[in-house]
Image: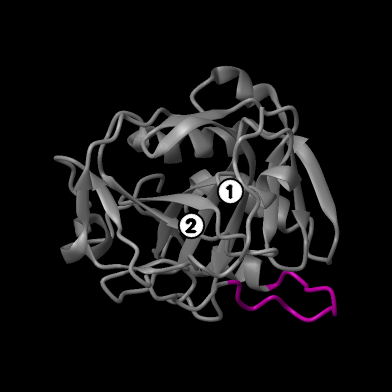
Amino acid sequence: MENGSNLASHNQRPSPIDIETGNLVERDFPPLNNPFANPIFENETVECVNNGMTVSCSINGSSAVLRGGPYENDYIFETMHFHWGYADTNGSEHIIDGHRFASEIHAIFRNQKYPNLTKAIEMDDGLGILAWLGVLREEDNHAMNAIFAMAEKIIEFDTKYTGTGGTLLRFLKELAEPVSGSSNWITYEGALTVEPYPDNVKWIVYDKPYAISHRQLDVFRHLKRADGTPNLEHSMEIASLSGRSIYKPKGGEFDTDDFEHKKCMLL
């Protein structure tokens, strides 16, 4: 039964934001699970599309479930997409203490109360997003090879590629694994940063970066928009918190050393 309320506005809680680590508020949260831990997902089909804004990938028949943390209900995985910039160091959407990073990945989930993403976007408790920031490395991140192989097949606007999802799903599993049972993340209430920009998102931004190279970022920048021009950047301006708080789990640490020293997972 649907018991959320319809959104009255799309700009009350904008995203992305600057995560000021000195101003985080502690709160008790149950542990997060890893929504991609189920090994059956590696046999699923993945579809990626160049929608003119980003590369968006979905798992056909996905039943990946996010639970715990700030989420009162189960949230079902819908899609993941990527953000990048015209330069190698300005592609992330969220920033930490004023510092922007090379890239950002978003995994979007809908509240299980709603039958599809379209309906969830309309409701004030409709969406949950996991986000990871990417830092620049000289070497390619080989764990992302499958992603860029698919991206190179959808350079033209509105083209799609469907393939076996094993490698991509293992990447998602590894991204989410440190989240499972840990408390090294922050959460806040904000908005989806792609159209239609509803402000009904419970965000989680994790403190463990992934690596990405200049060559890999250039693949994104060669993707074409609807007008045929290269999509050189896909990131939003930083929004004001406007009185909102950023929370971290009680006893947890949002540790930025991995960003400072470029210690990345999935090299």
Q: Which residue is mark 2?
A: 140
Q: Which residue is mark 1?
A: 145
How far from the left and from the top, in percent, is residue 264?
33, 52
The amino acid at mark 1 is Asn
Q: As drawn, is 47 to the left or to the right of 23?
A: right
Graded by Cα atoms within 10 Å as few (under 14), some (14 to 19) or many (20 or more), the crowding at tag 2 reads some
As drawn, 23 above or below 98: above
- The magenta segment: 222-234
Graded by Cα atoms within 10 Å as few (under 14), some (14 to 19) or many (20 or more), the crowding at tag 1 reads some
Depth order, front residue of 230/241: 241
How far from the left and from the top, in percent, is residue 229?
78, 81
Q: Residue at x 25, y 39 (%)?
A: 183
* Sequence-earlier tag: 2 or 1: 2
Depth order, front residue of 213/135: 135
Q: Is residue 232 magenta?
A: yes
- Residue 39 visible in the picture: yes
Q: Secondary structure at mark 1?
A: helix
